[in-house]
C-alpha cells in the first residue's frame, strides 16, 4: 500500500529546501501527523514548509501544552467541559492525574495518579529516583481531577465545503491500549500488590487502538461538543479547524463528557477505520469511510468546486 519509500535519518530532514522541492515536483499533498509536529520545529512548519498541507496549519500549535493559547485555553474559551485543574499539589483532596513529560521517552509522558498530597509527594520521589520524571518537569506538571470512567476518542471531521447541516461529522470512535496500565487492570488486586517498585506505577504508552461505539443518547452530546469546538476554533484560530480532528474524552457516571486532550489533526486511533471504516462514518456515507478516504474525498471535492485554497492553509 506504500507506493514509494523515502528514508530520512531524522524526520526534520524533510524541511530541507531541496527535499521539499522534490515533494512538490511529485505533486504530493501532505497530511500532518503527530510525529511530524513533534520532531519538526513548529515555527519551521508554520513559516517554511511549502508543501501543500491539508488542514489549518496554524492550529497545530494548540497541541503544544507549553503554549499560552493551547487546547486547554481553547476549551475554556469555548465553554467545553474538561477535567478541573488543581493549581497546587497541597490542594489534592481526591484522585488526580499528574501530567508531565517522560524524562527519557520523547513522545511519551510520565503520568501518575494520586489521591492525596502525601501520595503525590511519595510517588513523585520514587519516579524521580527511577529517572521516569525530573524535578523540573514536575514543577510544570498539570494536575487535574481524575475522571473515573471509560475513555473515548471522538474522531471528527469538519468540512468547510459541505453545504448541508452543521458540516461536522463523527467519522468514528476509538479507544486505546496502553502499557503498562492495561497489564495492571488484568491482574487481581492482591497480585498487583506484589509488583516490584519498578513495576508498581503504570505508564500510559499507547500501543494500540480498538473501535468503539457510544450509547445512542451520548451521540448527540458528542456531536454537539464537536460543533462547539469548531465554532471556537474559527473564532480563535482563523480559519478554524479544517478536516480531521480528535476530541479525547472520558465519560463519568452521570454520562457527562470531559475533554482531556485535543488533536487538531488526524487522531492516532483512526487507524482502526482503515479500509473497513466505522459504523458511524459508514452509515453517513453508505460505504467504508476511513479518515484517509474522507480527506481524499474532500480534496477531490475542493478541486471540483474550485476551492482548493479553502482546505490547505
Ligand atoms: N483527567 C483524566 N481522568 C482520567 N483519565 C485521564 C485523564 N486525563 C487523561 N487520562 C488518561 O490518561 C491517558 C493519557 O492522556 P493524554 O491524552 O493526556 O496523554 P496522551 O494522549 O498519551 O499524550 P499525548 O496527547 O501527548 O500523545 C489517556 O489514555 C486517558 O485514559
Ligand atoms: Mg492525547
Image (cartoon, helix red, strand yellow):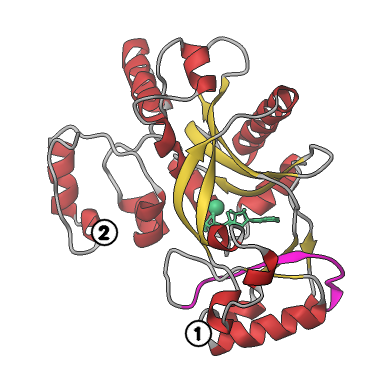
Residue sitting nearer the eye, 108 or 35? 108
| Residue range highlighted in magenta | 90-103
Q: Nearer the viewer, mark 2 or mark 1?
A: 1
Residue 196 picture location, percent across and down: 56, 82
Q: Residues within 10 Å of mark 1 (few under 14, many from 20)?
A: few
Q: Is residue 119 left or right of residue 73?
A: right
Q: Can you say whether 64 is above or below 222 in the image?
A: below
Residue at image position (58%, 77%) is 195
Residue 289 seen from this side: yes
Quarter the C terminus occupies: top left
Say which quarter of the image contains residue 138. Answer: bottom right
Residue wearing tag 2:
11
Residue at image position (55%, 79%) is 133
Say which quarter of the image contains residue 141. Answer: bottom right
Q: Can you say whether 106 is above or below 60 in the image?
A: below
Q: Can you say whether 135 is above or below 267 in the image?
A: below
**Are the residues tagged 2 and 1 within 8 Å (C-beta)?**
no
Asked if residue 92 lies in the magenta stretch, the reply is yes
SS category of the residue bearing label 2: helix
Count of numbered circles on the image:
2
Residue sitting nearer the eye, 277 or 68? 277
Quarter the N terminus occupies: top left
Q: Can you say whether 163 is above or below 194 in the image?
A: above
Residue sitting nearer the eye, 89 or 212? 212
Residue wearing tag 1:
131
Residue 125 picture location, percent across and down: 65, 87
The tag on residue 41 is none
Residue at image position (56%, 23%) is 169
Residue 262 picture location, percent across and down: 58, 46
Residue 162 seen from this side: no
Residue at image position (18%, 37%) is 2
Residue sitting nearer the eye, 44 or 155? 155
Amino acid at each position: 500500500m506504500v507506493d514509494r519509500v523515502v528514508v530520512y535519518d531524522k524526520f526534520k530532514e524533510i524541511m530541507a529546501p531541496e527535499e521539499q522541492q522534490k515533494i512538490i515536483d511529485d505533486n504530493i499533498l501532505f497530511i500532518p501527523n503527530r510525529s511530524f509536529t513533534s520532531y519538526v520545529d513548529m515555527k519551521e512548519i508554520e513559516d517554511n514548509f511549502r508543501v501543500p498541507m491539508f488542514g489549518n496549519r496554524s492550529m497545530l500549535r494548540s497541541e503544544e501544552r507549553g503554549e499560552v493559547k493551547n487546547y486547554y485555553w481553547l476549551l475554556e474559551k469555548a465553554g467545553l467541559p474538561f477535567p478541573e485543574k488543581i493549581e497546587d499539589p497541597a490542594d489534592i483532596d481526591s484522585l488526580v492525574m499528574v501530567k508531565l513529560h517522560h524524562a527519557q521517552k520523547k513522545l511519551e509522558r510520565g503520568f501518575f495518579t494520586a489521591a492525596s498530597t502525601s501520595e503525590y509527594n511519595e510517588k513523585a520521589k520514587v519516579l524521580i529516583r527511577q529517572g521516569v520524571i525530573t524535578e523540573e518537569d514536575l514543577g510544570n506538571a498539570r494536575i487535574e481531577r481524575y475522571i473515573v470512567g471509560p475513555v473515548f476518542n471522538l474522531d471528527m471531521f469538519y468540512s468547510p465545503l459541505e453545504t448541508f447541516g452543521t458540516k461536522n461529522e463523527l467519522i468514528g470512535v476509538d479507544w486505546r491500549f496502553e502499557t503498562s496500565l492495561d497489564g495492571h487492570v488484568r491482574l487481581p488486586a492482591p497480585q498487583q500488590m506484589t509488583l516490584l517498585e519498578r513495576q508498581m506505577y503504570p505508564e500510559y504508552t499507547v500501543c494500540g487502538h480498538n473501535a468503539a461505539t457510544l450509547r445512542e443518547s451520548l451521540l448527540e452530546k458528542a456531536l454537539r461538543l464537536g460543533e462547539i469546538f469548531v465554532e471556537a476554533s474559527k473564532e480563535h484560530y482563523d480559519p478554524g479547524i479544517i478536516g480531521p480532528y480528535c476530541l479525547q474524552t472520558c465519560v463519568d457516571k452521570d454520562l457527562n463528557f470531559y475533554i482531556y486532550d485535543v488533536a487538531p489533526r488526524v487522531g492516532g486511533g483512526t487507524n482502526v477505520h482503515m479500509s473497513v471504516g466505522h459504523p458511524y462514518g459508514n452509515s453517513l456515507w453508505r460505504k467504508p469511510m476511513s479518515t484517509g478516504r474522507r480527506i481524499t474525498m474532500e480534496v477531490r471535492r475542493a478541486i471540483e468546486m474550485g476551492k482548493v485554497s479553502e482546505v490547505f492553509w
